Image: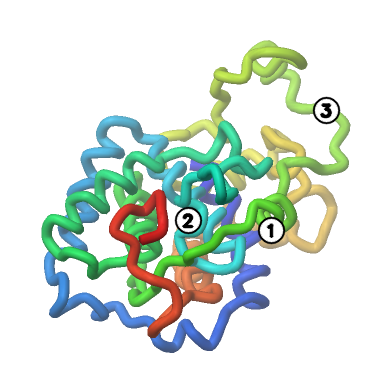
Amino acid sequence: MASLAKLLFVTLLASSLLASPGSAQLSPTFYSTSCPNLLTIVRNAMTQAVNNEARMAASILRLFFHDCFVNGCDASILLDDTATFTGEKNAGPNRNSARGYEVIDAIKTRVEAACNATVSCADILALAARDGVVLVGGQSWTVPLGRRDARTASQSAANAQIPAPTSSLATLATTRRANCPATGGDANLAPMDTTPARFDNDYYRGLVARRGLFHSDQELFNGGSQDAAVRGYSNNAASFLGDFAAAMVRMGNISPLTGTNGEVRRNCRRIN
């Protein structure tokens, strides 16, 4: 699943720069007493979602990524626009591409039935992202918990802080042109690697072979300082899987709201 693999490079760089002291207040056992069945509830719901559509694993992880990189992992991306509030869903990097909101809604409904007003949407998203990766063959990691949900969102920050799929490459791969015309075809899907339903290192093998789908993909292997890492991951799946899991923990620690900051939303789409 290339879209998951691609996150590793951005995450390793930015999470080290943006991690917050608030992450020290997170703990994997945060809900062990207040919501003891939380992990099972999330895993069961994600299993159902991924069984229905394998690429939902990548979609949920992308939501987590786009959430964390805009003012921290606070579920701000889940807030709907209203007449008096502009959220992040219609920011350029998210509009008509970010998806999986209904899966988080379904998980939240189940969690609220078991543990009313206890578990944040931010933590549900973090757990769902991990479970999605595992369900398509990726390595698991321990998710620190205790995040709280933002009462605000920033479309301008989403436009500025989420990396765009553009670069200096002149053209897309010729084999994609028929499926990705210059006009139209917005609903067409194109795989970013040869194993779109499996979490592995095939994405990096494709980059080494100069088969990156997007401009920003092939820039990861284009004569720069990151070439050695790409080549290393292409040859060593275990190294990639281990580093990816570590990067996800670091990303989840970006500027979380903890303690009395923020709130625990009852509905992930709106503030209480």
Position of 106 compared to 250: left or right?
left
Which residue lies at the image location 63% right of the left edge and 75% below the top edge?
Answer: 18
Residue for badge 1 = 157
Position of the C terminus by quadrant: bottom left
For label 3, count other residues whose C-alpha is less than 10 Å away and answer few (under 14), some (14-19) or many (20+): few
Q: Nearer the viewer, residue 163 or 240?
A: 163
Position of 271 compared to 191: left or right?
left
Question: Looking at the picture, which amino acid does disc 1 mark?
Answer: Ala
> Is residue 70 in view?
yes
Residue for badge 3 = 171
For label 2, count other residues whose C-alpha is less than 10 Å away and answer few (under 14), some (14-19) or many (20+): many
* Distance between the alpha carbons at the discs numbered 1 and 2: 16 Å
Residue for badge 2 = 64
Q: Position of residue 248 (x, y in %)?
A: 48, 65
For discs 2 and 3, the disc positioned in front in the rendered view:
2
Which residue lies at the image location 75% right of the left edge and 19% below the top edge?
Answer: 174
Q: Nearer the viewer, residue 173 or 233?
A: 173
Q: Position of residue 121 (x, y in %)?
A: 35, 60
